[in-house]
Image (spheres, rainbow, N blue to C red):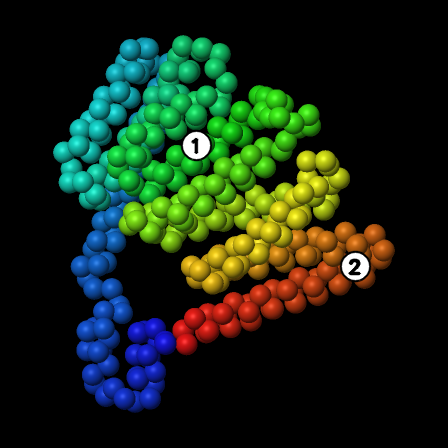
Amino acid sequence: MESFRAELINFIEDNSVAQKDIDEVVKLSKIKPSSQAWQVFINTVFLSIGSVALGLSCIFFLAYNWSDFGRFAKFALVETALVVSLIVYVKAQAGSMVSSATLLCSTLLLGALMALVGQTYQTGADPWQLFFYWAVLMLPWALIARFTTIWLIWLVLLNLSIGLYCEVYLNPLSLLLDHKVSVIWLIFVVNTLSLVVWHKLSPSRPWMQKPWAIRIIGLSVGMQITSLAFSAIVNDKITETLALPIWAVCLVLFYLFYRKVSFDLFMLAGICLSGSIITITLFAEKIIDFNEIAGFLLLGICTIGLGILSAFWLKKVQVETQL
């Protein structure tokens, strides 16, 4: 069946609705956001931007006046702001915009406090520890608040921790493997597990059912496995020999899940993009060395053709889902 919006458009185009009643019908159908919906949206956007700006302003103020403040004044400034933000969160209604925005500000201030401790006492800690302990300390907040944005920030901090850790310890899996493992592989595994867990838990948790959050995690997984497959084509390393087969398996699994189980046109578009990138890379590796001028011409034709085929297929899939 077609969507309600498509059905209404068909009625209007077939002149089933009188010209003078179109505005009233559109208003009653609630296709266009009401003034109240716009007010809620604007309040949410400004409150979120304001909370982030407030947290960053404390960080920038401290950084700009670093030499003018003593050690205790610096800690007093950040800790006071953090305590005030937590008090506001506790006093605010649970699940409200104010509580979510306040928790976002508190998360930034917690990171500022961790950076301040490391910068002030110069403990010799590696940079990865800053993001790791930041993620550890904010984990209880994420568990209690059940706020999507906080969980995504936590996942970003975990990714940064892994990346910076691998810069210090070049082979973090030395006890298991003799050769060095790319940091992208580790991040890919972590994000893939996060995506699986998110899909597994989201049916029973409304706060995890926001499509944009799943798409961000899925996009991260797709970018990482695509970059590994790309590297496997242009390089010849032991750690990347399995990248192409794993990339192919991921593409099939993503297609089956987001086409058959949980339809998502955005994720299908990502599959097309990843497939086009790897296909063009394979094509380029085979023909550029044979004839450079003709190779680039064929490469351009291949790129345009894959783009057109992807657009037609995505349009066809979209139409099929509306029938």
Tell me what residue is drawn at x 54 percent, y 40 percent: 188
Residue carrying label 2? 295
Q: Residues within 10 Å of mark 1 (few under 14, many from 20)?
A: many
Can you see residue 170? no
Element on which disc 2 rests: helix
Q: Residue 106, located in which quarter of the rendered image?
A: top left
Decide if residue 120 is on the left or right side of residue 275. left
Residue 147 in the image: state x and y as whole percent: 29, 41
| Of callouts 2 and 1, the N-terminal one | 1
Q: Residue at x 70, y 65 (%)?
A: 301
Tag nearer the camera, 2 or 1: 1
Q: Secondary structure at mark 1?
A: helix
Determine the CA span between mark 2 and mark 1: 42 Å
Which residue corresponds to mark 1? Answer: 157
Contact (CB < 8 A) between labels 2 and 1? no
Q: Nearer the viewer, residue 286 or 247?
A: 247
Q: Is residue 188 left or right of residue 143?
A: right
What residue type is disc 1 on?
A: Leu
Across and down, in percent, residue 2 comes to 36, 76
Q: Amino acid at mark 2?
A: Gly
Is 18 above or below relative to 237? Answer: below
Q: Position of residue 160 (x, y in %)?
A: 49, 31
Q: Quadrant of the C terminus?
A: bottom left
User: Could you tell me which residue is drawn at 64 percent across and 64 percent down?
Assistant: 306
Question: Can you tell which quarter of the image residue 15 is in?
Answer: bottom left
- Label 2, residues with CA under 10 Å away: few <14, some 14-19, many ≥20: some
Relative to 37, residue 7 above or below? below
